Amino acid sequence: MAVPSRPAPPGAWAPLQKLARYARLPLERFLAVEAASGILLLFAAVVALVFANSPWSAQVANFWALKLGISLGSLSFARDLAWIVNDGLMVIFFFVVGLEIRREIHHGELSELRRAALPVAAAIGGMIAPALIYLAIAGDPPTHTGWGVPMATDIAFAVGVLALLGRRVPAALRVLLLAVAVIDDLGAILVIALFYSEGLHAGGFAVAGAGIAGVFLLQGLGVRSKLAYVLPGLVLWAGVYAAGIHPTIAGVILGLLTPVRAWVGVDGLIAGLQRHVEGEEHLKSLEGHALEEALAEVDHLRREATSPAEALIELLHPWVAYGIMPIFALANAGVSVGHFSVDGDAGRVILGVGLGLLLGKPLGILIVVYLTTWLGWVVLPRGLGFQHMLVLGVVAGIGFTMALFVAQLAYGDVALLDAARLGILLASGAAGVGALLLGRFLLEPPVEPGVALTADEAEASTEA
């Protein structure tokens, strides 16, 4: 049944409105596909690489080095564009990560030990093995600091690759990938906080504590406006930065503090709407202030039907996926390969990062999942076998966003940072192609209920 179209607003010109609607449809379809963010990331990475190896590479470097800031009397705060992206915009990315972790712990795949055991085991194996492989190859100074680079999975690219496999990928495998990626992100956050923060200062922790206290105070007062939490969030960010911890951790902390319980809930929304519908004649008779109050109550029911965490994820996720992450890729994925040397330390970094992602991820996931299932600690979801775990392990080797982020914290030397970036790009591309090929050969599309395939049809399906 067709959905009735919304009437045009007063003063709207029908032909122009129709043209705007046709222009909006492709964008709406594009944003509706979660994996589309991976396409944007790929495009941004290609653009960054092209410009880094073009005659305009110096101008691009100067652009990201452009200083921006504010000054108030004798006080001033100025940073370059690259810092604003990596330490500013990426705080929002990590805030959404914190929200997703909080949601998963409350009522998602990590809410029960039985459900969380498998993704936790797979993620731990997928983090330890890449780090060990990196240390085995590049464990000597000054390259050993990059052991955390190949540990995390880029969820946008990974989901995009699985989407290309279509119906060959069971829903349970997608859910498992999401859970593993969330735990990967949590592991990367802990690594950043514990190993890539230095020069800790007690005064900064006091300021961060004041920000957290402000959040709890607002929650205790029952303040529901999300904008009200921006100020204590900024205080938390400033405190974490002053303490010597990477400021993106402030986003994670704020996300974990966000409530995941709805005030009204779906039942309250239904009851409230029914109350207004049943009083339809009374509602029609309202005007002025009384009508505004009724509409305000309906708006309150709508806003509080979901938890603050869910509402913020819905609000911010498109901006992160289609804005912040591609901008981050533009700022960090550019590697000049014209005068690049793969000898010595740089070569070890490329090899360590590349093999850590490409081999460490699938090996770590497969070994740990096999051992834990053999010991009876975890059980594979119905319909999933070790061929699915192999595809999961290979696609988890797509590191990109989080790996690039850790790399720019791990290396003080520009040549080593470029080497790590190149290793990430090569390994992530190879992992994506490898996952697609393995998925085509190892995973079979489901047979429609009631449709029996002949031997020839089954063979043709397998070959396809």
Image (cartoon, rainbow, N blue to C red):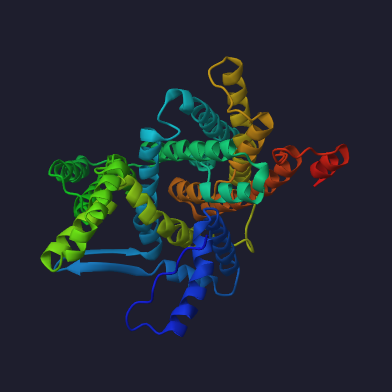
Residue 373 shows in this picture: yes
Residue 141 shows in this picture: no
Quick one: 365 or 161, which is closer to the camera?
161
As displayed, is residue 302 above or below residue 392?
Answer: below
Horizontally, is 373 left or right of 325 in the view? right
Which of the 4 image quarters holds residue 194?
top left
Spot occupied by residue 190 in the image (x, y as percentages of width and height): 39, 36
Spot occupied by residue 71 in the image (x, y as percentages of width and height): 20, 68
As displayed, is residue 398 above or below residue 60?
Answer: above
Q: Residue at x 84, y 42 (%)?
A: 457
Horizontally, is 8 left or right of 172 in the view? left
Spot occupied by residue 173 in the image (x, y as percentages of width and height): 59, 37
Horizontally, is 282 left or right of 414 in the view? left
Spot occupied by residue 268 in the image (x, y as percentages of width and height): 26, 43
Identify the residue at the far top of this view: 375
Q: Residue at x 15, y 68 (%)?
A: 287
